[in-house]
Amino acid sequence: MTSDQIAYLVFGIILLLALIFDLGLLSRKNHKVSLKQALYQTFFWTGLAFAFFVFLWIQEGKTLSLEYLSAYLMEWSLSIDNIFVFIIIFSSFGVREKDYGRVLLIGILMAIVLRIIFITVGVVLVEKFEWILLVFGGFLVYTGYKMFTASNNEEFEPHDTMVYKFLKRVLPLTPGDGDGKFSIIENGKRRYTVLFVVVIMLAAIDVVFALDSIPAVLGISRDKLVVYTSNIFAVLGLRSLFFLLRGAVSKFDYLQQGIAIVLVFIGLKMLGEHWINKLVDQTTQVFISLGVIVLCISGSIFYSIFMKKRGLPPDVKEDEIY
């Protein structure tokens, strides 16, 4: 077996065992996830991701493992943006808290399948048409600029999205949650509940975010192993991160700007890759990318916390948001 084949095999085994453990022990049906449990699950998934980084360092060497770490941190930070939208979707459709875990799990597993398809298409396009990297780079610079200048007060309304309007047009929907079911029989006809709609919307929204994140990862590494594994590890950790941050996510007022700076940096790096490769070796580029990602993301989070731009209303106790 080649070195890459061994790495894929190890990744597959880790993924299978982790999902069995998560489904069997950490995800009980109709169970509300406490902040403590969410913290343990977050440590579990991030610990696995960093353990795989150590494995790659030993198996593949320093450069590739650091590319993976940079890509994972990039995807992880972008996934926090997903959580903002997930919270709005759950609230808008009135999903009960006991159903959060199951709905998130199915939506995220669907998102992983769709991401694998998107990644495969993106890698094939880059291999066949290398000039498309310039398009990706320009897109990331534009996206980063729009994200940096966008108002935090812009409201997202799930019922106004094309996905929901399409589902409403092609499927017989029922306004209830079917007591936790995804579909019910009503007057002799099968109708789909809001839980089904939310699952589809979670997967669809993640695909929208993938339009930014996958080009960003390709700007960090062209290696398929890095692109696939960093994306999947980051998406799998989304569910526990949702339960951990859903009460505190509104405090990260400047995270959007931090992510935007990273996207612009990677976009410019892709646009100037021909000249950068002549001046800076690959390992140094990886260290610089990793440093920029860590500095921007951690800096924006700490800046948000200390500035407390919005904070909590005076009549809301902090422990009530969990």
Image (cartoon, rainbow, N blue to C red):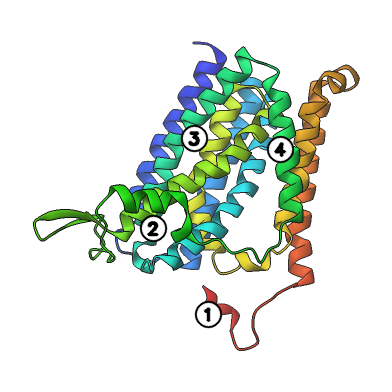
Q: Which residue lies at the image location 42% right of the left edge and 35% below the top edge?
A: 113
- Residue 140: mark in rendering: 4
Q: Residues within 10 Å of mark 4 (few under 14, many from 20)?
A: many
Of tags 4 and 2, the one toward the viewer is 4
Task: Kindly give the residue lying farthest to the front in the view shown.
Answer: 169
| Residue 300 picture location, percent across and down | 76, 57
Give the distance between the C-alpha atoms of the residues marked 4 and 3, in whole angstroms: 18 Å
| Residue 21 picture location, percent across and down | 38, 46
Q: Which residue lies at the image location 71% right of the left edge and 18% below the top edge?
A: 131
Q: At label 1, which amino acid type do we have?
A: Glu
Q: Which residue is mark 2?
A: 101
Number of numbered callouts drawn: 4
Give the distance between the C-alpha atoms of the residues marked 3 and 2, in whole angstroms: 21 Å
Task: Kindly give the residue lying farthest to the bottom in the view shown.
Answer: 315
Task: Kindly give the residue lying farthest to the top in the view shown.
Answer: 1
Q: Earlier in the sequence, mark 1 or mark 3?
A: 3
Q: Residues within 10 Å of mark 2 (few under 14, many from 20)?
A: many
Q: For residue 204, which quarter of the picture?
A: top left
Q: Which residue lies at the image location 64% right of the left edge and 63% below the top edge?
A: 154
Q: Residues within 10 Å of mark 3 (few under 14, many from 20)?
A: many
Of tags 4 and 1, the one toward the viewer is 4
Decide: is 84 above or below 71.
Answer: below
Q: Which residue lies at the image location 80% right of the left edge and 23% below the top edge?
A: 273
Q: At label 2, which amino acid type do we have?
A: Gly
Do residues under tags 1 and 2 come within 8 Å of each other at their CB atoms?
no
Is disc 3 placed on a helix, strand or loop? helix
Q: For residue 267, which quarter of the picture?
A: top right
Q: Which residue is mark 3?
A: 115
Q: Which residue is mark 1?
A: 320
Q: Front-most of 277 and 237?
A: 277
Tell me: 200 left or right of 254.
Answer: left
